[in-house]
Amino acid sequence: MPLPNLHTIEGVLARFHDDLYAAETAHDRQAVRDRYLGRKNSILAEWMERLAAAAPAEKRHLGQLTNALKRELEARWATFTETQQATAVPADAVDVTLPGRAVRLGHRHPLTVVRDRMDEIFARMGFTFVEGPEVEDEWHCFDALNMPAEHPARDMQDTLYLSAPFPSFEPGGRQRTMLRTHTSSIQIRYMQSHTPPIRIVAPGRVYRRDDLDLTHTPMFTQMEGLVIGEGISLADLKGTLLAFARAMFGEKSRLRFRPSFFPYTEPSAEVDISCWSCDGAGCSMCKKTGWIEILGCGMVHPAVFEAVGYDSERYTGFAWGIGLERVAILRYQVDDIRLFFENDLRFLEQFPY
Ligand SMILES: [Zn+2]
């Protein structure tokens, strides 16, 4: 090996400098320092060993070079660490140039999306929104709606009765309290305190004694509508529902009325809407029929008017009831109604509206 000289030292110092500035972490920088200045297996250590083994004639010269190298490496390391400390960012510093952290926004539940859309449509048509108690008495929920105690229609709407009597219910006599089976009870309450003309929608939760399965839950959401005035006809009912269907499901929607029975309306109808997926041609969503059952409706039965003290000769009106879950199931192609109530984000996050 040729004898080291000053030129050799400058080469070592230049590489030391480059290695230090290329090191990315404090750990890396310490490793560079140890590789050059460490007690063992370092470049300086090699020089020391060579010095120890050198011939006496070379010792003086080699000793001066080794000392010079040691001094320079230490000086450069000291300068380097001082610079590092001076430019280091304090631990508690705030970097105002960093991009902000985005706040993760939630979104509406799919049933709320449907409800909001329906609210918007009926509000535009001039309807007033009315709410009422979920705990009802039998009179508001059944009797006033032409469903006396022995009426078989009560079986279809069998509900959950409460043991505690509600103190202020009217009229006297039958006072069993229950969870309302439909929001028609709100309509009765509204009619008792208002005179026609009336144009309201009554949204809310309703309860029935159904077992939990793919298409039934003991609790679901209804939006019922009621219009009462002089000269209100079936044509007004059809026009109102058609306008709603077109706003909700698309401009090309058509309706089909099938005769049905409800105690509180006469005549009564089930309403089908033309399938918005195939436009009536027949597909899997409409079970190849081209139509989808969407709601029930009819002209208000005179017995209902009599129950709330309206003149059934003077006034006529119509009412309908629509299930929000049914609309959501159809719109979003959901095959299990229970998913809406399980609060599983994996399901709910598929509807980011
Ligand atoms: Zn279809």
Image (cartoon, rainbow, N blue to C red):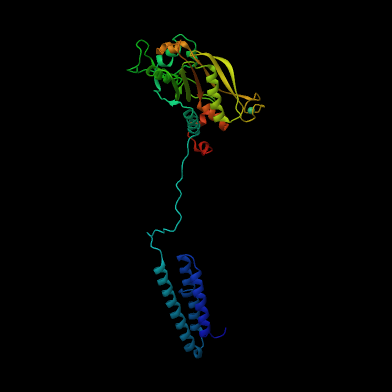
Q: In the image, is residue 180 above or below residue 333?
A: above
The structure residue drawn at horizontal position 64% and vertical position 25%, both measured from the top left corner, is: 290
In this view, the residue farthest toward the bottom is 57
Tell me if residue 120 can be seen: yes
In this view, the residue farthest toward the top is 150
The structure residue drawn at horizontal position 55% and vertical position 18%, both measured from the top left corner, is: 235
Nearer to me, 17 or 282: 282
In this view, the residue farthest toward the front is 231
Regarding ligand 1, which quadrant of the image does it lie in? Answer: top right
Task: Report x, y in % for residue 350.
Answer: 54, 38
- The answer to which quarter of the image holds residue 259 is top right
Nearer to me, 3 or 185: 185
Nearer to me, 128 or 12: 128
Is 166 left, or right, of 43 in this rendering?
Answer: left
Q: Quadrant of the N terminus?
A: bottom right
The structure residue drawn at horizontal position 56% and vertical position 33%, both measured from the top left corner, is: 332
